[in-house]
Image (tube, rainbow, N blue to C red):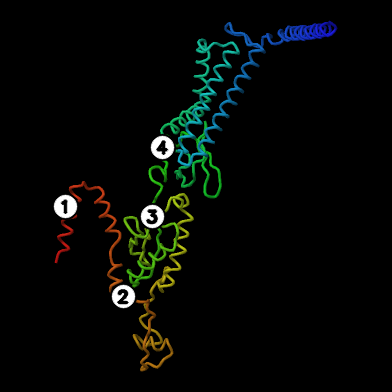
Amino acid sequence: MAAESASGSLQRAGDSVLDAADEAARRGVDGLQPFLDHTLLQFSGVNVTVGGVLAAIIAVLLTIFLSALLRRALNRYGERQPNANRAAIYTLSRVVHYAFIGIGLLLALEFIGIPVAKFTVFAGAIGVGLGFGLQAIFNNFISGLILLFDRSLKVGDFVELESGVHGEVHSIQIRATRIVTNDNIDILVPNSEFVSGRVVNWTYRDVSRRIRVPFGVAYGTDKELVKKAALEAAAEVPFTLALEGARKPQVWLVEFGDSSLNFELVTWLTAEATKRPATVKAAYLWALETALSTHGIEIPFPQRDLHVRSMFGQQGDAALSAFRRNPPDADVPVEAPGAPSLAHEEKQALSSNDATLDVQQGGAELAGPADREDKHTTDNDAREP
């Protein structure tokens, strides 16, 4: 009986404490309620209270938090799946973020006391603001959405701006797109420039690209020897995609310059080298200088020939001998250093004009199947003795 009496006393004491807590909470809420119901702003039949503003802030913060959690989950999924499309995951995360922000803003308006149905009251003011001060921001926001859905510009693409700056796309934000150059410089470009301007996307369709490295040699140099040296230089550079096949390196004679024969080393690059054009060109120039020096090929500089009609009162060979301080009747052979010669078979193998072959291959790709079959038959007939 004593135990039951003690238990009943504890129960009554606990109930009393709970009742006291409820009463205190009720009094606290009753005391806080006037503060929450305090009107901050009143217009067009809408009362903006302190409680409504606090609820709106909580709603916006909650939607931002949920958006961050979902975007983090998407990023982790992309990291765990090596075959996942990085650009698609980024686009989905940005769209989810914008959707949650929109939902949060609508909930905030409801909590403040502005029904969405009556939001047309503010549409005119917002339209005027967009027309005057927010037009550029709104244009960049819509342009960012177009870039995300159009997929003409994706995260990870290597682009070239009209100013000549190269860089990789790292993020597409509400107002601007962040591009990071190979020198680790961040460039913020307004989204509208990518929609209305001209942008060169180096990795839009295919990550492999072809580069042309110009160089010049002295007149009189064997062009087949130049081709051999340039191909050896291409083989030494690890950025070269292939040494055989349709995308093998080529050497083009492109111009008869004032002081040199101008060539171009044309080679296809690997995927990682496509995003570093300046570095790749420097690597090929380095290899070219080494290969040309190895084969004794002169890299010329601007020079002029001086023709003297008479010198020391003499002309012709006598003037030349006097200039060399040799007697006029001395038979001094003039030896000119020569470059190493190629074997006949090797010279024949290197004598093809790669520029002509490239044009022919391009025409074959554009021709239809029947045209290619006819051309193949004709070529075989031409090879018959």
Marks 3/4: CA–CA distance: 23 Å
Q: Which residue is mark 2?
A: 343
Amino acid at pointer 2? Ala
Q: Secondary structure at mark 2?
A: loop
Work out whether mark 2 precedes mark 3 in sequence or the reverse, and give the earlier one: 3
| Residue under numbered circle 4 | 152
Q: Secondary structure at mark 1?
A: helix
Mark 1 and mark 3 lie on one chain; the one further toward the N terminus is 3
Q: Earlier in the sequence, mark 1 or mark 2?
A: 2
How many discs mark residues in the rendered view? 4
The reply to whether dot 2 and dot 4 touch (C-beta < 8 Å) is no
Residue 73 x, y percent position in the rendering: 54, 32
Disc 3: which residue: 268
The amino acid at mark 3 is Trp
105 in relation to 245, above or below: above
Residue at image coords 40%, 59%: 213
